[in-house]
Image (cartoon, rainbow, N blue to C red):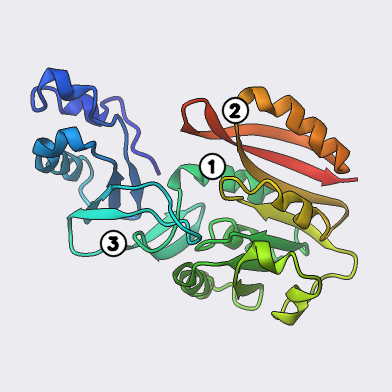
Amino acid sequence: MSYRNRITLRDSMKGIVEEPLLSLVPKRFDYIGDIAIISIPADLEAYRDAIVSKILSMRGNTRAVLNKVSKLEGERRVAHFELLSGESAETFHRENGYTYKMDVRKVFFNPRLYWERARVASKVLPGESILIPFAGVGPFVLPSAGKRTTIYAIEINPDACACLKENIRLNKLEGQVTVIHGDADLILSVPGSLEDKGFNVPENGFDRAIVPTPYGMDHFLGKVSDLIKKGGHIHFYTFKTENQIPELIEDYKKMGLEVEFYRRTGNVAPGVSRWVFDLVKK
């Protein structure tokens, strides 16, 4: 999870980084497994080694430090990283009782959403059929499958697909998850394509969908909603400013979706946050 302590990284660099540049030192960084991930501004180039040394001293089992040098790019939603310390970006990450194997440089994984993923999993009921597009390495898939459900997962990144299948095996959830490698946006646009790719689509629709939507893909909600049975649930993630939320709720109502709950799940840009909506199809 994210590094949280009374002493932030910035505080710990006082006396090392000169005062005019100290405000550029990130207050926090993330851990995925035993790998620390930080974004070091270019203006702190001269202090990179000192920052890495400080990070390594903060937790004894830190095996590598990665510097995130770009935002998510391309259809695979993968950022670019520099390996500042260590020999590999492969790790095992444990979250909410499940183990995830991944190479951080090849897949997308946000450790800050661990509580949100646990919240959604707590809503899942045994026996449900669940559609999870943009499944990644499985952070929404595994805890839902652990509730004795049937999961249908779609992921476009072949490396993430391979990790997802391995994570299903590692957590002994074989037989409960069908994994499809492909573009969820295209797959759900073509009638019958799910069946063609091996999905046994429930006759009356899925009981639930968990949709960690990438930025700018709000149109995807309509495609998912068509596959959900009446009374079924959708956990939909979107990126909005707070003043857009009231209009968004009205739009969902017009689509025949009741908003049961919504909350902010993190800031992604000045004024823009990730929001989750728990929706029920009427």
Residue 29 horizontal/vertical position (percent): 32, 39
Q: Which residue: 20% across, 37% down?
A: 42
**Residue of label 3:** 89
Horizontally, is 120 left or right of 196 in the view? left
**Residue of label 1:** 115
Front-most of residues 98 and 161? 161
Front-most of residues 46 and 93? 46
Q: Which residue: 69% across, 79% down?
A: 197
Three-letter amino acid code of the residue under disc 3: Ala
**Residue of label 2:** 241
Please tell me how crowded label 2 is: few (under 14), some (14-19), or many (20+) other residues with Cα within 10 Å: some
Q: Measure how far apart labels 3 and 1 are at the Cα level.
A: 24 Å
Please tell me how crowded label 1 is: few (under 14), some (14-19), or many (20+) other residues with Cα within 10 Å: some
Give the structural element (helix, strand or loop) at label 2. Answer: loop
Three-letter amino acid code of the residue under disc 1: Trp
Q: Which residue: 58% across, 61% down?
A: 135
Residue 22 horizontal/vertical position (percent): 18, 23
Front-most of residues 229 and 123? 229
Residue 266 horizontal/vertical position (percent): 51, 34
Indicate which disc, 3 or 1, sits on the residue closer to the N terminus. 3
Quick check: 228 above or below 9?
below
Q: Is residue 50 visible?
A: yes
Give the structural element (helix, strand or loop) at label 3. Answer: loop
